[in-house]
Amino acid sequence: MSEQALRRFYTFFRHQTGIAFTPAKRYYVESRLRARLIASGQDGVEAYLAHLKTPAGTAELEQLINLLTINETFFYRETRQFEALTQSVLPELAALRGPGGVRRLLCMPCATGEEPYSIALHLLAHGLDPVRHHIELHGADIDTDALRAAKAGLYDDETLRHLPGPLRARYFTRQPDGRHQISPAVRACVQFAHANITRTQDMQRYREIDVLFCRNLLIYFDEAARRHSVRILRECLRPGGFIFLGHSESMRHMADLFLTRHFGAVIAYQKPGDVP
């Protein structure tokens, strides 16, 4: 793999996904790229790139993206944000929107489902049944393998390690293989779909969102892709809607697009504008 060919590959992948790999990820990328070259029967990076850019390469591009995206997550991560959601954000939105209106929440990326299911479980634990309280939960991701796992709802002990015992006992059933199946009632609370955050056309389905969780994704983007994606996310939000980012992320370079809100130690970003 020549340096020139690898640079072209990095540029292509960044254009497709927004992800900009650092030099520290070189072995990670090259080993997986080499595996896909062998599996697809392509003779070198240049031929592989040419194949990916054709309609015949669509399925291979999906395989590549699935292989190179990162899905490290677990249940009840950064729960202070969930507490801010139930204690402050949802009551504020209820006051703004009026009683009975549907609240739409989106987790992107949703990876293998732990985050949107965690929100569903947190809502249920606080007496907010998503169906009865008109709360829609959506999960979106670019990784089709992760989405299939999310829909299946099977998890091992490690990913459940921070989940409160009563919730684990009530909403999970241990399977013969040792994994835990989340209950059909919780699975029914979340609608999953494939979407690329960098593509406006993919995000068209997510309009009129009230709360958007986009945690630990933008840190993998370069500045141009980050700005582009944030503007797309902003368009998805209703006026007065909120974005929660990961604890190491911020909107400091895009402060003109959002109001910074503090809920105790939790920071969220609110879309300004006329609120009905």
Image: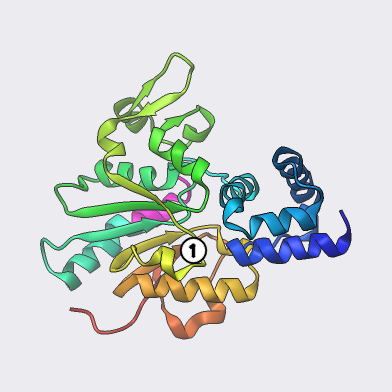
The secondary structure that most of the magenta stretch takes on is helix
Seen at 25% across and 35% down, the residue is 185
Residue 91: image x %, image y %?
Answer: 22, 63
Look at the image and tell me whether residue 173 can be seen: yes
**Magenta stretch?**
76-83
Q: Residues within 10 Å of mark 1 (few under 14, many from 20)?
A: many
Residue 20 position (above or below residue 170): below
**Extreme left residue here?**
99
| Secondary structure type for disc 1 | loop
Residue 97: image x %, image y %?
Answer: 17, 70
Seen at 85% across and 65% down, the residue is 4
Residue 166 position (above or below residue 53): above
Residue 133: image x %, image y %?
Answer: 16, 52
Q: Quadrant of residue 236?
A: bottom left
Residue type at mark 1 is Ile
Q: Quadrant of residue 85?
A: bottom left
Query: Is 5 in front, or is 241?
Result: 5
User: What residue sits right under mark 1 in the picture?
Assistant: 197
Residue 117: image x %, image y %?
Answer: 37, 43
Residue 75 falls inside the magenta stretch: no
Residue 78 falls inside the magenta stretch: yes
Query: Is 276 in front, or is 46?
Result: 46
Residue 77 position (above or below residue 100): above
Q: Quadrant of residue 53?
A: bottom right
**Extreme top residue here?**
176
117 sits left or right of 16 in the view: left
